[in-house]
């Protein structure tokens, strides 16, 4: 690998005139959102107590623990309320990250707990339809009743945000 800038690890620095690698940019942005109170997303990270482990303050350590960022993946915290650390982080696709968000709704069926999107795909039911059904019906009926109108949900059936507690 050709060295970037004046760095030992060869991944460069972020900024206007630097060609940093995706791995370095991920590390720099992780630190920025956790430590920089002026960062636009600080409130969702550092502002709510998300920390970066001491070891990862140095890029060399982050790189040794996580390796080079795979194409199409970014850093993801397994426990969304936990720190950025080796034990709590992985490289994940956008789809994996969306299923691991604070707003994700989980449903347990036949002893298996999965996000609502998983069940929606498994049973071929529109996600909005499934949300409506789970609010009103027993779980078996919600999963196994075929839609009468192509899984469309009417305006009068829109579900309130309170369902998040399913």
Image (cartoon, helix red, strand yellow):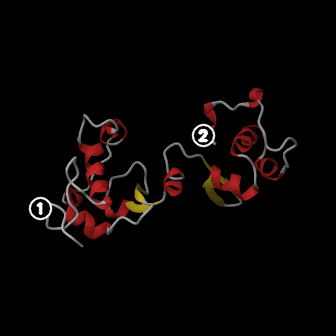
Q: What's the distance in space between the residues labelled 2 and 1, CA to CA?
A: 51 Å
Is residue 138 positioned above or below 1 on the image? above
Callout 2: 10 Å neighbours few (<14), some, many (20+)?
few
Image spot of residue 20 (x, y percent): 25, 57
Specify the label residue 6 is tagged with. Answer: 1
Image spot of residue 132 (x, y percent): 73, 38
Image spot of residue 117 (x, y percent): 64, 51
Callout 1: 10 Å neighbours few (<14), some, many (20+)?
few
Is residue 63 positioned above or below 30 on the image? below
Toward which corner of the image does residue 153 lie, by quadrant? top right
Q: Looking at the rendering, in which quadrant would you find the C terminus?
A: top right
Q: In the drawing, does residue 147 fall left or right of residue 90?
A: right
Q: Looking at the rendering, in which quadrant would you find the N terminus?
A: bottom left
**Residue drawn where x is 30% and y is 41% of the image:** 46
**Discs 2, 1 touching: Cβ within 8 Å:** no
**Residue drawn where x is 26% and y is 45% of the image:** 32
Residue that badge 2 annotates: 165
Q: In the drawing, does residue 143 fall left or right of residue 39?
A: right
């Amino acid at each position: 690998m050709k060295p970037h800038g004046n760095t030992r690890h060869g991944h460069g620095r972020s900024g206007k005139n630097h060609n940093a690698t995706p791995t370095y940019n991920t590390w720099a942005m992780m630190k920025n959102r956790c430590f920089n109170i002026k960062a636009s997303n600080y409130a969702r990270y550092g502002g709510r107590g998300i920390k970066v482990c001491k070891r990862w303050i140095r890029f060399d350590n982050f790189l040794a623990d996580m390796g080079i960022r795979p194409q199409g993946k970014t850093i993801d915290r397994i426990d969304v309320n936990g720190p950025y650390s080796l034990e709590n982080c992985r490289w994940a696709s956008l789809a994996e990250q969306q299923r691991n968000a604070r707003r994700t709704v989980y449903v347990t069926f036949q002893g298996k707990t999965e996000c609502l999107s998983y069940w929606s795909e498994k049973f071929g039911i529109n996600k909005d339809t499934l949300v409506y059904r789970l609010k009103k019906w027993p779980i078996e009926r919600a999963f196994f009743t075929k839609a009468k109108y192509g899984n469309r949900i009417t305006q009068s059936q829109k579900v309130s945000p309170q369902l998040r507690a399913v």
